[in-house]
Each structure stands twice: as C-alpha cells, then as structure tokens.
C-alpha cells in the first residue's frame, strides 16, 4: 500500500468515527476533527508555479508547496457534506483534489494564508481568487501563464470540487471582505 493510500484510509476512518459518534454536532470538536484531514493530506505537485519560483529554482532555493485548496477548510466542506463524503471512493476523490499543490515562495505562502480567517471555518476571499488577490501570476511548462491559457473565471487553473464555491460563499466567507 502506498503512503498516500494509507493517509486516505486513516484520515477517512478518523473522520468517520467522529461523525458516527456525533462529535461534529458539537462546535467544540470541529477544529480537532478537521485537523484529522489536515494532518492526513498529501502533496500532489500540479506543475504550476509562481513566476518568482522560477527565479528560486535557478538559485537552488526550494519553493514552498501551497495547497490550492486549504486542507482544513476543505475538511469543513467534507464534514458538512458527510452524506456525500461518507462514501470512501468519493472521499478519496476530494482528498486527491485537496492534495494539489502549487509551488510558491515562502513569502507568497504567508500572504496566501492570510485569506483564511483566525479559524479555518472562516475565509476572507473565495479560494479561486487568492492567487489573483495576492498578485501571484502562475506558470506551467507546456501550458503557459494562467492568465493567458485558462478561461475565466479568475484564471484559476486548479480543480475545485462540485459545490465547494457555493458552500464557501454561503457558509465560510466572511462578510468583511473588500
């Protein structure tokens, strides 16, 4: 069994146990439950990188792998939609999507993190706008720049689970965004 398969199985079992025990119904437990997903997520390089990373690579400095869907926030989506994700195959699909990473600089990663509120149950802008709002232009070999190769909306080249943006807007998005 590959390590990623083990991580999927263990994180699924941990969340399923919490859900079966009714712990999600108690707000007190939600952060701890979502940490199970966060700690068990993988890193699947998409090949996308910021322009600044291209310079880093030339200097020998390693980039930071930014998860293009915030894993702990994605866990809220999974748990609030447990009737769908209680199916292990569907859970594996969203785990794979949430494991996608984009290479960015450490400083860019810090800026991207600022779009998640003090708790992972709050976001300050939609996930598909974070790179754009941080002024991060993305590039992928044999594809080109995200703002030239990808169609609207938001030039966001990554897979987003069905219903995620609506959930984020209705449940997690802070009213304080500008």
Image (tube, helix red, strand yellow):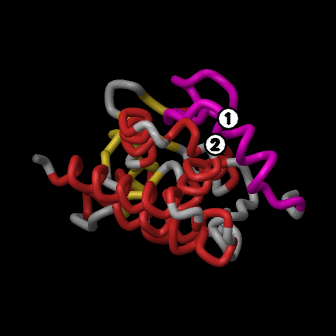
| Residue in the foreground of this view, choosing between 100 and 2 | 2
* Residue 96 visible here: yes
Q: Residue at x 49, y 63 (%)?
A: 18
Q: How many marks?
A: 2
Q: Position of residue 170 (x, y in %)?
A: 81, 46
* Residue 139 visible here: no
Within 10 Å of disc 2 (Cα), the crowding (few <14, some 14-19, many 20+) is: some
Does residue 136 lie above or below 158 as drawn?
Answer: below
Residue, far left: 1
Q: Position of residue 105 (x, y in %)?
A: 43, 63
Within 10 Å of disc 1 (Cα), the crowding (few <14, some 14-19, many 20+) is: some
Per the model, the C-alpha gap separating discs 2 and 1 is 7 Å
**SS state under label 2:** helix
User: Could you tell whether 167 is left or right of 110 in the image?
Assistant: right
Residue 128 is marked as 2
Q: Nearer the viewer, mark 2 or mark 1?
A: 2
Q: Residue at x 58, y 52 (%)?
A: 79
Image: magenta residue range: 147-175
Q: Position of residue 158 (x, y in %)?
A: 50, 36
- Residue that numbered label 1 is attached to: 154
In the rendered image, residue 125 lying in the magenta stretch gets the answer: no
User: Could you tell whether 71 is left or right of 12 in the image?
Assistant: right
């Amino acid at each position: 069994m590959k390590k990623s398969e083990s991580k999927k199985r263990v994180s699924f079992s941990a969340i399923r146990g919490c859900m079966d025990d009714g712990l999600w119904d108690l707000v007190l437990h939600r952060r701890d439950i979502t940490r199970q997903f966060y700690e068990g997520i993988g890193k699947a390089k998409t090949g996308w990188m910021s322009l600044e990373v291209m310079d880093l690579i030339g200097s020998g400095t390693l980039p930071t792998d930014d998860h293009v869907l915030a894993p702990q926030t994605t866990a809220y989506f999974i748990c609030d939609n447990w009737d769908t994700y209680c199916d292990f195959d569907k859970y594996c699909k969203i785990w794979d999507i949430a494991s996608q990473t984009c290479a960015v600089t450490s400083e860019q990663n810090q800026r991207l993190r600022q779009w998640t509120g003090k708790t992972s149950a709050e976001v300050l802008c939609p996930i598909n706008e974070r790179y754009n709002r941080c002024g991060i232009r993305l590039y992928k070999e044999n594809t080109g720049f995200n703002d030239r190769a990808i169609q609207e909306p938001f030039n966001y080249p990554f897979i987003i689970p069905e219903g995620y943006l609506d959930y984020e807007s209705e449940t997690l998005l802070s009213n304080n965004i500008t």
